[in-house]
Image (cartoon, coloured by chain):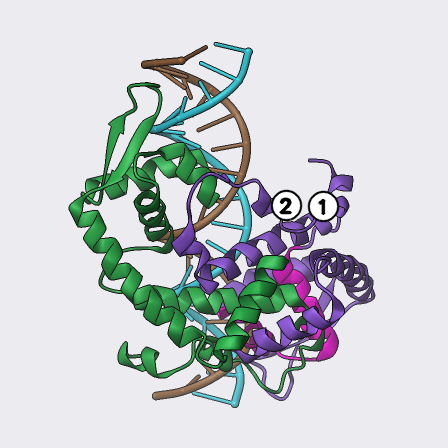
Chain colours: A purple, B green, C cyan, D brown
Amino acid sequence: MSVTSIADKPVLQFLDDRSPNVRTEFLNSLAGYRLRQISNAFMSDFAAAMVGTGMRPVQISILSVVEENPGIRQGEIGRALGVARANMAPLMAELEGAKLLERITDEADRRAVSVSLTKEGQAMLKNCKARITAHERRAMDRLTESERKTLLRLLNKI
Amino acid sequence: MSVTSIADKPVLQFLDDRSPNVRTEFLNSLAGYRLRQISNAFMSDFAAAMVGTGMRPVQISILSVVEENPGIRQGEIGRALGVARANMAPLMAELEGAKLLERITDEADRRAVSVSLTKEGQAMLKNCKARITAHERRAMDRLTESERKTLLRLLNKI
DNA sequence: TATTGTTATACTCTATAACTATA
DNA sequence: TATAGTTATAGAGTATAACAATA
């Protein structure tokens, strides 16, 4: 699959390749099953949109949270994103090693680290956000503006 | 967390424990991010609802497809569910070992195997379906019947 | 040659337990 | 005693490549 073909097709091309002559009535009646299919399709298109940046979804989430909460503690980022402390450690080390963020010991509580974006981190996030915006527009292509709002509202209400 | 508490709370209890004082405006504006959060919350509640059956989501999906397509080939199941051939092999061996389904060589094409449910498989699927129905009702608790239909329609339209 | 199913393998994500240093 | 962060590890889920049997 070429990179250029991604922009031409709806996100759920990843679902369209399924066997059409197999009955799946029960599964299709389940909101949870449909949500997972669509979420996975979103993730696939998202990953394709990030090719070249070297960024994975969780890394971008971290950069975004740090941007909106400068100086935030590492543990707070993990709690906000649902990432376990044990898994935050290597992720943060990776982002720090790539010079995308800086960690300094919080002098008020020397157990904690205070996190902020570097210039490179800000630039990377800006690049990723532009790609994500295009990815979202592509993904929601088949819905009208009104339908998109309704979908978000219902998802947030669940 | 006790098992009985699960039935009392909305599915997205798994999201409600997040840090409320951390700003996440960009992430919250993304349909893809919200879809993934909700899908993961559904999966967690689903897993809790299946405790005691020993069944995981993909196994139930397989049983359901076999029920609706008796004698279906193994490869067709995988294609319909998006499971790679290489990963179908151990899954099918596991379900066959648990006596939930039977595999016989397709005499018309001796490379393929024809799959069907055993009595035990039928009973297990019936049990799981009842649990799933309750799980879905619980998950969609905060939506009216009209809103549920709208949500499904929009998800299917994406 | 192509396809069905199998095996081995590897990579990512996620989850738990034990450790340190600080509080 | 509890908390912030780290390390090691193990379990799912997923992906590719190589193989045997059959078409």
Whether B24 is drawn above or below B32: the answer is below
Give coordinates of residue B76: x percent, y percent.
42, 35
Q: Nearer the viewer, residue B12 or A126?
A: B12
Are the residues tagged 1 and 2 within 8 Å (C-beta)? Answer: yes
Number of numbered discs overlaid on the protein picture: 2
Q: Residue at x 74, y 74 (%)?
A: A67
* Residue span colored magenta: A56-85
Q: Chain of mark 2?
A: A
In which quadrant of the rendered view does residue A14 lie?
Answer: top right
- Magenta stretch holds residue A141: no
Note whether residue A28 is visible: yes
- At which x and y percent is residue B86? 42, 34
- The residue that mark 2 highlights is A13
Counting from the top left corner in percent of width and height, residue B114 is at: 30, 31
Q: Give the residue type that dot 1 points to.
A: Lys
Type of amino acid at the residue the image marks with label 2:
Gln
Magenta span dominant secondary structure: helix
Indicate whether B146 appears above or below A3.
below
**For mark 2, does the 10 Å Cα neighbourhood hold few (<14), some (14 to 19), or many (20 or more) residues?**
few
Residue at position x 69%, y 47% in the image: A48
Neighbour tally class for label 1: few under 14, some 14-19, many 20 plus, Cα within 10 Å: few
Which residue reaches farthest front? B146
- SS category of the residue bearing label 1: loop
> Is A67 a magenta residue?
yes
Q: Which mark is residue A9?
A: 1
